[in-house]
Every structure is written in structure tokens, then in C-alpha cells.
Image (cartoon, rainbow, N blue to C red):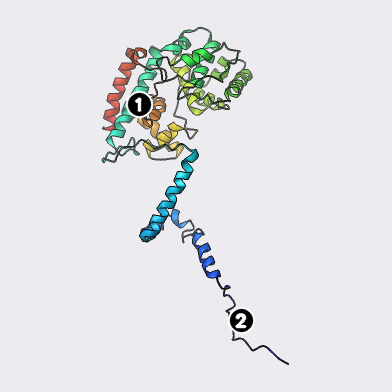
Amino acid sequence: MLTAPASPAGSLADGRPPCAAPAGADGALAATLRVLPKFCRHGTLTERCPICHATVEAATRATPPRARANTARSRSQGAAASRGGLTVRRERRSEDDGYRSALAPGLRSTEDAQRLAEEISFAAGRLAGLSSDPPGLYAEVATTADLEQVSWLAFLIAYIGPLEREQPFAAIEAARTPWGELPALEQTEAGPRGSLEDGRGGETLTAYARFVARAGSQEQAITADASWSPQQRFERIYERLALPGLNRRARYDLLVTLGELGRYPVRAPALLLTEEDVVTLAAKRVFGIGDRLTLERRARELASALSVPVEALDLGLENWARAERITQGFHDESSRGESFAAAAEAALERAVAALDC
């Protein structure tokens, strides 16, 4: 009887060790292992571990020049492909010149601090102008006796938004309707802070009408509980106005406008950064942190140090992050009265001193 020759101990019949991979599998296995995420001894991804990250960077720097060139080329190609259907926005940021401020810990340049002071002072002047000498349709909201009609007009101003043109209220004027009639907004141009989106105008206006119907009137919907403080009323009505197509800035601006024009007892208690909008992103850059509660606290501290209303930071922060200023109805000098100029000048002086810029 013929028998197969005995294999050495610990080997298979073909002479391979029990764990040996088939020929040609070593390269594939190594390639697979290279792309698997690696966890460090601290239980997190090595690339994200604040302790082990330095090791990863050192290994990257040690990569041969040819490999780095290939990696850079592939990333460049990938970025170019991803930009095909996207709009890439680059943040406006000045070079670090050693500037530091406890009030704006995210800033690293004197130029950025100066621009922040200028934009907050402009926004403070605008608030003073709304209270004392409002331009355009804001004046109609302030003086018309029918509270239902002016509440509706204020909503349309905030929802559509003033344009940055010689006639900032032209689009709103053309689209406006009496309260009880929903306007057709398909051809209406929205301002830079407006919330109007193509195809959603009817949905948002209907949602607002339902919000009012539940309370019985706009006055009752916005006043709500008479025992609330102006700050409580602002925050709670702001939350209730979270309607489809009505973004944070429009809700905030509506209530600020109604309060500054003296139509309702409302006052902003904070920035209320409840969305990842341009104001929130600018606040993160200025205050150097992403936590919402800390952002709100630092915004109140900055407003207090500058002796401006905290709501001035809403428009101020957005304009600071932009290349061109949004005037929000105060387009030129003719729309800015003495109260605007005096408040803006005083606010700028205080801001420059507080920010030491």
C-alpha cells in the first residue's frame, strides 16, 4: 500500500506553513492593510489623536518627494473635480500681525479688528436710525395706525429683504399686498438678507398665515403672553417663527425691526445662533470657538464692552465676513439721519478703544 510521504511537523502536504497565504496574496493583503484606518493606544483614530498626531505628521514629512508629489497631484485633481458643481468661497482673512484681544480671541490681525469695529458701529447706527428716523417702508411700519397691516408689511420686508440699490424697497413695494391676501412672489428679487427662495414663497406665506390663525391675529401671535419680558417675548416668538423657508436672519431681523420701530415690546436677549448661517460662521471666527453657548456669552460680553445692543452684532458680524457691506435699507447718506451718524460715530470710538485697534 502506497502512502504519501510524511510532511514536516507544522506543515501542510504542499510544504506551506498552516498560516501561509497562497502565492501572490501577500501584496494584496499588504495593500488592504495600508488603507484600513489605524487606531492608536488611546482608542481613537491616529490621525485625530492630539497625542499621536505628531507621529503621523512626522511620517508624512518623511514620505519620499515623488510620493508627496503624486499625493499632491491626486488631491489637486480631486479638488478640481469637486469644484465642478460647487461654488468655492474663500474667507476674507488678513495676515497675523500679532494682534490679540480677549474680547475677540479668534482675531489675529489689527486690520480684522478694525473692520469688526467699523461694521458693528454701522449696525449700531442703523438700529438708532430705525428708532429715530427710519427710511422708506420702515417709516410706514413705524407710523401706520393699523397694527395688522404694519405687522404684515414688516414680515414682507424681513422675508424679501431690502435690495442693495438706490431704491432698496422697490421689490417689496411691487410685491406687497394688504393683510389677508398672499402676494405672488415668483418674479420677486430677494435682498441679500432676505429668506425668499425660488418656488417656496407660497409655502412660507401660507405657514405664516397659519401661525397667525392659531393665535387669532398678528398682534396676539407676536404679543402672546402679556406677562413676558421683552427679552422673553423675543426669544419665544423667534422660536415659534421657525417656519418652512423662513431662516434665522429673517426671523431675527423681523423682531428687531418691530422692536426698534416701537410696534411691539420685544428686545433681543442674545444672537440666538440656532442655524449654521453666515452670522454663526463669522461668530466662530471672531470668538475662536464653535460651542454655541460660549459664542452667545462672548457676543454679549463684546456688546457690553462696546456699549451697543447685542443685536448690532447680527448684521455687524455678517458684514465683517463679507467683501461688500449689506446696508439693509440704509443704502446712502440720504437715508441716514443725524441719529444714525451720531450713534455710529460714538460706537466706533468705543469699539476701537475696547478692541485696542
Q: Which residue is mark 2?
A: 14
Which residue is denoted by mark 1 in the rendering? 120
Q: Residues within 10 Å of mark 2 (few under 14, many from 20)?
A: few
Disc number placed over residue 198 in the picture, else none: none
Residue 282 location in percent, x, y? 40, 34
**Residue 351 appears at what percent x and percent y?**
30, 27
Answer yes or no: is residue 327 visible. yes
- Earlier in the chain: of badge 1 and badge 2, it is 2
Q: Is residue 46 above or below residue 9?
A: above
Q: Are marks 1 and 2 in contact (CB under 8 Å)?
A: no
Total numbered labels placed on residues in the image: 2
Q: Is residue 197 above or below residue 287?
A: above
Amino acid at the residue labelled 1: Ile
Determine crowd level at label 1: few under 14, some 14-19, many 20+ residues with C-alpha closer than 10 A: many
Give the SS element for disc 2. loop
Secondary structure beneath dot 1 equals helix
Who's the residue at 44% across and 19% down the image? Answer: 163
Identify the residue at horizontal 48%, vertical 44% (top origin). 81
In the depicted view, which residue is nearer to us: 267 or 67? 67
Q: Residue at x 38, y 11 (%)?
A: 133
The amino acid beneath tag 2 is: Asp
- Expressed as whole percent of the image width and height from the top left, the position of residue 19 reads 58, 75
Left or right for 274, reference 343: right
Residue lying at the far right in this picture: please name it: 1
User: How far, Cα to Cα, is label 1 from label 2?
Assistant: 81 Å
Asked if residue 185 is positioned above or below residue 100 in the image, the reply reads above
Quarter occupied by residue 56: bottom left
Does residue 310 appear in this view?
A: no
From the image, which quarter does the C terminus lie in? top left
Percent position (x, y) of residue 172?
50, 15
Foreground residue, 179 or 305? 179
